[in-house]
Image (cartoon, rainbow, N blue to C red):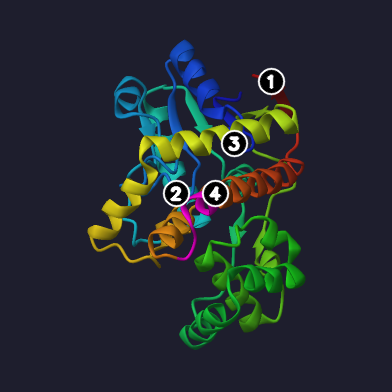
Amino acid sequence: MADITVIIGPTGVGKTELALRMARETGAEIISADAYQVYRGLDIGTAKVPQATIQEIPHHLIDILAPTEGYSVADFIARSSDVIAQLRAKNTPIIICGGTAFYIHAFLYGYSLSAPAAHSQIRDELNEKLAQIGPEALWAELKSIDPTSAAAIHPNNHRRVIRALEIFHQTQTPPSQHRSKKPAPRSDCKLIGVTRPRDQLYAQINARVLAMIQAGLVAEVQSLLAQGIPPTAPAFSAIGYKEVIAHLTGGISYDEMINLVQQHTRNFAKRQLTWIKQFEHLDWYKP
């Protein structure tokens, strides 16, 4: 019997709206499967629901970490499992919703992660290489080694790109081979995929980015930097934040910043769609 509803789809497609409607109809609580909504202070750029909505419909795994803390797929699996146990003890329906398809895939297929511990010397060398060749070239290096891992990581997510390459240099095997999974997804989950035509999705993404800028994304980043959060913090790997920081430091113009956020978000949506093809037994929903 499936008592967990999992909602997946590319960014900006309408997952949150569906999750909120279903939660109101069923009395469910929502677990966020987003790699960046866990960070306090990153509200506009991660499209968090308003606090009034959270008071109406409880959300989990939102605002639980400082922007300087790391968050991984292993953290998501452990924390979501704890929340599920608590909600089941209360017989509360559960909805998992978020755009980090890798996290959801790992949850559904019971990934067992066996990567080696961090290696500081290799990591330092990779950070130096990042400074020399830039994030796109470093991500391309990962893609040539392990397309599966590269598809799950945005080029701006320096921390995860470096970690994947670090695993490769330690083991001489693709990092994706260091996780095993079950042959079939969890039987306690019903999977809903939200979709819309590609041209509509991209138009929606462009409009959403403009709305974030108008809502104060630049001021949000300025406030975080003023609090002493370094530009290299894990939270700032999120799309939108790196581009705003580049604008604030004089690297790109205001218009270039907007265009890059839109472009990177569309590229991310394309990668999400590739990931979604790996999911089985999807019920499709068109807003």
Give the crowd class for mark 3: few <14, some 14-19, many >=20 residues within 10 Å: many
Numbered label attached to residue 286:
1
Nearest to the eye among marks 2 and 4: give it: 4
Q: CA distance from mark 2 to mark 3?
A: 18 Å
Q: Nearer the viewer, residue 202 or 238?
A: 202
Q: Are marks 3 and 4 in contact (CB under 8 Å)?
A: no
Query: Compared to 242, does 6 lie above or below?
Result: above
- Badge 2 is on which residue? 36
Q: Earlier in the sequence, mark 1 or mark 2?
A: 2
Most extreme residue toward the left, as rendered?
Answer: 227
Secondary structure of residue under mark 3: helix
* Residue range highlighted in magenta: 251-257
Q: In this rendering, would 225 be left or right of 99?
A: left
Q: Earlier in the sequence, mark 2 or mark 3?
A: 2
- Badge 3 is on which residue? 205
| Magenta-colored stretch includes residue 256 | yes
Q: Are marks 2 and 3 in contact (CB under 8 Å)?
A: no
Nearest to the eye among marks 1 and 4: give it: 4
Q: CA distance from mark 2 to mark 4?
A: 16 Å
Secondary structure of residue under mark 4: helix
Nearest to the eye among marks 2 and 3: give it: 3
**Amino acid type, residue under disc 1 in the picture:** Lys
Q: Earlier in the sequence, mark 3 or mark 4?
A: 3
**Amino acid type, residue under disc 2 in the picture:** Tyr
Q: Earlier in the sequence, mark 3 or mark 1?
A: 3
Q: CA distance from mark 1 to mark 4?
A: 25 Å
Nearest to the eye among marks 3 and 1: give it: 3
| Rendered location of residue 8, percent (x, y) | 62, 34
Q: Earlier in the sequence, mark 1 or mark 4?
A: 4
- Please give the name of the residue rendered at 29% of the width and 62% of the height, measured from the top-left corner: 229
Q: Earlier in the sequence, mark 2 or mark 4?
A: 2
